[in-house]
Amino acid sequence: MPSMIEAKNVWKTYGDNVVLEGLDIKVEEGEFITMVGTSGCGKSTFLNMLLGTQQCSKGELLLDGKPIPKEPGPDRGIVFQQYSVFPHMTVLQNVMAAKAFAKKGLTGYLFGQAKRAAKDEASDILNQVGLSHALNKYPHELSGGMKQRLAIAQALLGKPRILLLDEPFGALDPGIRADMHELVLTLWRKHKLTVFMVTHDLKEGFYLGTRLWVFDKLRQDPQAPGAYGASITYDLPVGQVDKATYEEIDDNLRPVVELA
């Protein structure tokens, strides 16, 4: 059986600008991958390639042994740092809308039994993310953490196999982030998801999931900063990393500038 996700010598370029180069990885179903690296090193680009909104410039990115479709599908749900909600709809209506848009047809409207089923399904997933008390609230009435719970509910409604998280907790306060960590871990286990999460927080990367990837450039040319792309320089099992390795990665992500 092929691995769920496999990258074979994957490159991503935009004209002369090389963003990613030579990615060779395998991910089995049920893993939780956290991705860290400096801004602009290609983490979100790789996430979008998994989603299907961007494609490889060279190499192969495979899902179950076949090229990832060139468009998003219900098997891949995504949550961004910026909330994607309809301000004129309630929490319940926003989640039901995600179901309606997945419906084939000209209007995307739900009627009769389909509408009742969508309402029950949306209510259930909102209960799982801790928003059962807020079904009739509007987005402007929600805190940041509640809005992110809503976004996760929208992503999970289609019953995806893969959940993609692009810095979902970057704008949240530390206490709320801790609550969201527990929620994501609970949903990962309950729904048997395969998760890829981009974060700028190294501690968060080591706390969540099963593997940590560090994206960085192995080659640099000061005269041509776009000549080389990032690769995965570390692929580490979470919970089995010694302090020296952690500090080395942290120094690479946040270099200390010595004052003269």
Image: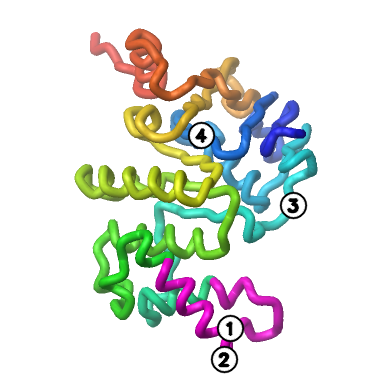
Q: Which comes before the other along the chain, label 1 or label 4? A: 4
**In this view, the mark in front (1 or 3):** 1
In this view, 162 is above or below 151: above
At horizontal 57% and vertical 43% (from top left) the residue drawn is: 47
**In this view, the mark in front (3 or 2):** 2
**In this view, the mark in front (2 or 4):** 2
Which residue does the numbered mark 4 point to in the structure image?
Answer: 33
Question: Circles 1 and 3: CB distance less than 8 Å?
Answer: no
Which residue does the numbered mark 2 point to in the structure image?
Answer: 112
Quadrant holding the N terminus: top right
At horizontal 37% and vertical 11% (from top left) the residue drawn is: 242
In this view, 173 is above or below 113: above
Identified by mark 4, the residue type is: Ile
Label 4: few (<14), some (14–19) or many (≥20) C-alpha neighbours in 10 Å? many
Q: CA distance from mark 4 to mark 3?
A: 21 Å
Relative to the observer, which residue lies in front, 241 or 247?
Answer: 241
Quadrant holding the C terminus: top left
Q: Residue 112: x and y, percent?
A: 57, 91
Question: Circles 1 and 2: CB distance less than 8 Å?
Answer: yes
Q: Which residues are magenta?
A: 99-124
Residue 159 showing in the rendered view: yes
Mark number displayed over residue 69 = 3
Locate residue 203: give its quadrant: top left
